[in-house]
Amino acid sequence: MTIGLIIIGDEILSGRRVDQHFPKVVQLLAARGLQLNWAEVLADDPERITATLKRTFASDDIVFCCGGIGATPDDHTRLAAANALGLPLVMHEQGKINIQQRILQMGRDAGQEVDLNSAENLHRLKMAEFAQGAALIPNPYNNIAGFSLHKHYFVPGFPVMAWPMIEWVLDHNYADLFNREPRLEQSVLVYETAESALTPLMVELEAQFPRVKVFSLPSVGDANTRRHIELGVKGEAVQTATAFIQLCAELKKLRVEFSNT
């Protein structure tokens, strides 16, 4: 099982907004014993979005896509998803009803009469136009749904909407995958040692423990910490625990200074 994340928006790539989806999705997955395997950030470019979705639809990945499902001229995700699958864009009747209910509720809250056939309100219904066969993802914030197609889940770019919608997808569709394989991560800080001196040990550990990944995170240090490398192992719990014991033993043989993180 591979899980991916696509984040769409010119504002992310231009730096006008700082992406919040990546760390939050990592957190939501980790809370369920899952992990993110890849992520991409795309501009509001319909051709690139379509090409990317065509590629990911061809995989067996579970993919969350944040952004671009509104009804403004820079929202291309709904049409791009349809084009990527060669499907027509059609009105989803329940999605339409949800939007109309939202419009009426907003009118009641403002004490105003609402004309559902006004140009503005008819344009809002575009947010219920999805590729034929799409299923709805409920939006607890304003009831304007996202949609799903072929293990791809499309939600708004607004975190207040996107994150509970992603949680709903995980809890309703993939609960059987939660915590299926306990994972472990352990590391030490190795001081004043070159990464090249540790590379043979890292290669040896990964060869010996196929369900474990070895990682190294160098740091030049600061006023409070000496130059060091965080060296560790992560993966399947039993193999990782054994690999960590061996890692520490080999570091002692190398006579390098290290401490627990």
Image (tube, rainbow, N blue to C red):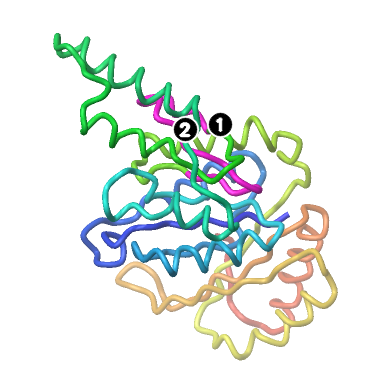
- Position of residue 62 measured from the top left corner of the image (x, y, whole percent): 64, 51
Q: Which residue is mark 2?
A: 164
In this image, 188 relative to 20: left or right? right
Q: Alpha carbon of mark 1 to alpha carbon of mark 2: how far?
A: 6 Å
Q: Residue at x 46, y 29 (%)?
A: 95
Q: Amino acid at mark 2?
A: Pro
- Position of residue 210 measured from the top left corner of the image (x, y, whole percent): 82, 69
In this image, 205 relative to 24: left or right? right
Which residues are drawn in magenta? 137-154
> Is residue 259 placed above or below 88 in the rendered structure?
below
**Quadrant where the N terminus lies?**
bottom right
> Is residue 150 placed above or below 224 in the rendered structure?
above
Q: Residue at x 22, y 19 (%)?
A: 115
Q: Residue at x 52, y 77 (%)?
A: 191
Q: Which residue is mark 1?
A: 168
In contact (CB < 8 Å): disc 1 and disc 2: yes
Mark 1 burial class by Cα count in 10 Å: few <14, some 14-19, many 20+: some
In this image, 185 relative to 82: left or right? right
**Quadrant where the C terminus lies?**
bottom right
